[in-house]
Image (cartoon, rainbow, N blue to C red):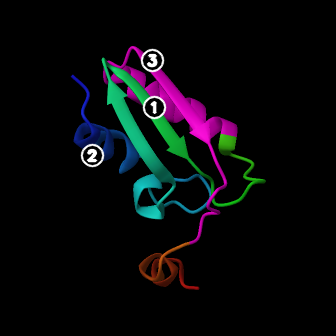
């Protein structure tokens, strides 16, 4: 059975943004996760609306989640609110 904790540990914390090389969980790109009857719904954002890796990221995340046993994965992309790095993340990025 898929749990939110399992998704965080086995997918989100192990999948790095291709440009920043930091996992999507630490970056704060995952806005919401809902799991019901092995169906996973995710609200995700990108660091920029023009992210060239967006479609690749969505497909790779879906594949990894399906490999954990999900029957269906829906990923909604949103830019509301726009992504903004935390102070801790800004320090990690050196900005």
Left or right: residue 65 versus residue 51 is: left
Instruction: Please name which of the two marks, 1 or 2, marks the residue nearer to the observer.
Output: 1
Q: Earlier in the sequence, mark 2 or mark 3?
A: 2
Crowd tier of the residue under label 3, counting other residues whose Cα lies within 10 Å: few below 14, some 14–19, many 20 or above: some
* Residue contact between numbered discs 2 and 3, judged by CB atoms under 8 Å: no
Residue 36, relative to residue 28: is it above or below?
above
Left or right: residue 13 versus residue 51 is: left
Q: Which residue is mark 1?
A: 41
Where is residue 45 drawn, in percent x and y?
A: 59, 51
Q: Earlier in the sequence, mark 3 or mark 1?
A: 1
Q: Which residue is mark 3?
A: 72
Residue at 47% over, 53% down: 24
Residue at 52% over, 27% down: 74
- The disc placed on residue 79 is none
Crowd tier of the residue under label 1, counting other residues whose Cα lies within 10 Å: few below 14, some 14–19, many 20 or above: some
Q: Quadrant of the N terminus?
A: top left
Where is residue 42 drawn, in percent x and y?
A: 48, 38
Where is residue 38 drawn, in percent x and y?
A: 32, 19
Q: Which residue is mark 2?
A: 9
């Amino acid at each position: 059975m898929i749990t939110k904790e399992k998704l965080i540990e086995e997918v989100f914390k192990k999948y790095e943004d291709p440009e920043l090389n930091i996992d999507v969980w630490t970056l704060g790109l995952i806005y919401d996760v809902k799991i019901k009857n092995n169906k996973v719904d995710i609200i995700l954002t990108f660091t920029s609306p023009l992210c060239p890796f967006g479609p690749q990221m969505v497909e790779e995340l879906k594949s990894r989640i399906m490999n954990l046993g999900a029957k269906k994965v829906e990923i909604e992309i949103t830019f509301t609110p726009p992504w903004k790095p935390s102070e801790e993340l800004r320090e990690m990025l050196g900005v």
